[in-house]
Amino acid sequence: MEQQRWQQQILRSEKLLTLLLSTYLARDEQAHLGLPVVAGSIMANKLLSLERSPEESEPLFKKYEAAVHKWVSRVNSLVVSKVQTARMVGISLIKQTAEQSWHLLLVNGTKWCQHLVNILNKNEPARTHRLALATLMSILGRVADSAELQREIALTVVPKFNQSL
């Protein structure tokens, strides 16, 4: 019974992530309009926090992992978009993703921090800088608990971060 419930959660999460990407985040110019729905869905359903269990159905979890990979790719493309509101959405979703998934932070944290420092070095509206700074501080706060991430992220990002300030 528990295994069946877990499989349903994985399937539901994969479908919802795919729906959010294709419906609300498909176009840079309109991504900001869907942010409240996307952020609420990610938080309420904990879509990014599922981890594989030893008895997990391999093909089912592979579909979920593929949806998460698409999610990360889309977030990365939003944060470097030419559209300012899309960059704001990307920054917001980086923060939310890093807060919800330790695994995704481990895998993508260095790249995300580089994107955020790059944004701080650009001529952006103050609210974009504030959001990038808050996101960077959130990530660095989580990194403080991990020696591995301190080496990988903090030691490379903090000097650039200090320079950009």
Image (cartoon, rainbow, N blue to C red):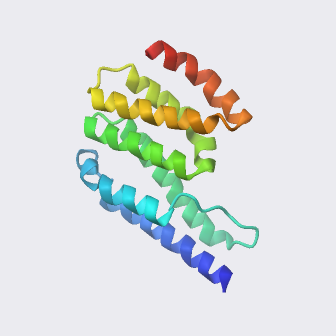
Vertical placement of residue 18 versus 131, above or below:
below
Picture residue at 32% right of the left edge, 60% below the top: 37
> Going by the picture, which residue comes out furthest to the top?
163
* Relative vertical location of residue 155 with respect to residue 95 in this rendering, above or below: above
Q: Is residue 38 visible?
A: yes
In this rendering, position of residue 164 left or right of residue 130: right
Q: Is residue 6 above or below residue 105?
A: below
Residue at image coords 56%, 21%: 158
Residue 51 shown left or right of residue 93 in the figure: right
Count the marks: 0
Picture coordinates of residue 43, whole percent (x, y): 45, 59
- Measuring from the top left, give residue 16's x and y in whole percent: 43, 67
Question: Is residue 103 toward the left or the right of residue 45 in the image?
Answer: right
Residue at the image position 28 percent from the left and 26 percent from the top:
126
Q: Quadrant of the C terminus?
A: top left
Q: Is residue 161 above or below residue 16?
A: above
Give the left or right position of residue 145, taking residue 14 as reference: right
Q: Estimate the x, y position of residue 114 in percent, counting from the top left.
A: 50, 28
Q: Is residue 83 visible?
A: no
x then y, percent, for residue 119: 39, 26
Instruction: Name the residue rendered at 66%, 86% in the picture.
Output: 1
| 77 or 106, nearer to the observer | 106
